[in-house]
Amino acid sequence: MRPYRPRIENGIRPGNARFVWLEGMCGSKPKKAQRVAWLAAFTATSAAFAVAIFLLAASLSRSVPTPDPSAAPTAAQATDTASAEPMPEAPGPGGDAQDRDSSGELGAPGALPGSGVDSADGILPNGATVFDEQYPGVGKLDPALLNALQQAARDSRLSFYVSSGWRSERYQAQLLEQAISTYGSEAEAAKWVAPPDKSLHVWGDAVDLDGPKTKKWLAEHGAAYGLCLAYANEPWHFELRTDAPDQGCPKPYPDPAHDPRLR
Ligand SMILES: [Zn+2]
């Protein structure tokens, strides 16, 4: 193997050794007409370039939604709280329909067609809040966690929309399967979805909340209710930390793969 080409062949034939457009860089001054033509060409090119950049910037600012600092990465949302088919009986007693994440489509993580996973496995309709205990996804949450969520929702006067709460083992297994196919490996999927036998969602000890206002409010006041983020890469995933009212929330793990409870 040769590390580099020993000789650069530039293909310039004898008698044709200079590029015509380099003419202006040699000692001789180009004629005035040439200079004017060059200046015009340069100006036109610059203007076209500036217009192109402006148009590109304008189209980018249109297509990219205003970033919400508390919003989750899109890919993460897709896995942890992927959108579901909206169910017709979606309730919403809280009534704060404004406080939804930018996609507006987020609901419970979706069931794979034909998987048989449904509401009894914890899938929630769009708009379900922490007060919708009739759905197993909310009703089977740990009572202490659910109480804290409901108290915080009342005090904040915000609707605490739940995109996912309690999940059955087979639902969690399906989410893990989806994550492995999305991220391409079990190791990468483990950063987003816990295995069914270890998931805090399967135990009813974790809730994924929707809504930038809710997440912002909890970032400021959640500790007083024991409601803390568990993972830095999942700004929607809250768990109950009974020490938090006195000691504040502990530092979140970078991602679930760093969580010793899941090993
Ligand atoms: Zn979660």
Image (cartoon, rainbow, N blue to C red):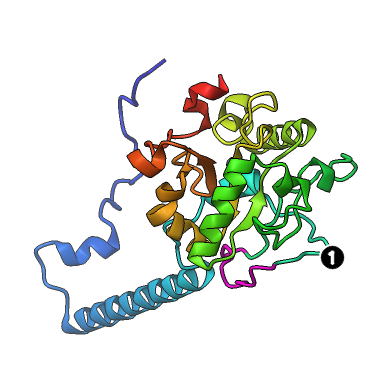
Position of residue 169 measured from the top left corner of the image (x, y, whole percent): 76, 30
Relative vertical location of residue 109 with respect to residue 242 in this rendering, above or below: below
Nearest the viewer among 262 and 131 is 131
**Which residue lies at the image location 56% right of the left edge and 52% below the top edge?**
149
Relative vertical location of residue 91 with respect to residue 190 in this rendering, above or below: below
Answer with left or right where residue 159 lies relative to residue 22: right
Q: Which is the main secondary structure of the residues drawn in magenta?
A: loop
Q: How crowded is mark 1: few (under 14 residues within 10 Å), some or many (20 or more)?
A: few
Position of residue 121 measured from the top left corner of the image (x, y, whole percent): 80, 41
Q: What residue type is labelled 1?
A: Pro
Position of residue 116 measured from the top left corner of the image (x, y, whole percent): 89, 40
Please identify the residue farthest to the left as the structure is shown.
27
Relative vertical location of residue 120 with respect to residue 181 in this rendering, above or below: below
User: Looking at the figure, which quarter contains the C terminus?
Assistant: top right
Magenta residues, start to end: 93-103
**Which residue lies at the image location 70% right of the left edge and 49% below the top edge?**
138
Q: Is residue 102 magenta?
A: yes
Please identify the residue farthest to the top as the structure is shown.
1
Q: Is residue 1 visible?
A: yes
Q: Does the magenta stretch include residue 180?
A: no
The residue labelled by disc 1 is: 88
Relative vertical location of residue 131 with respect to residue 9 in this rendering, above or below: below
Position of residue 123 measured from the top left corner of the image (x, y, whole percent): 77, 48
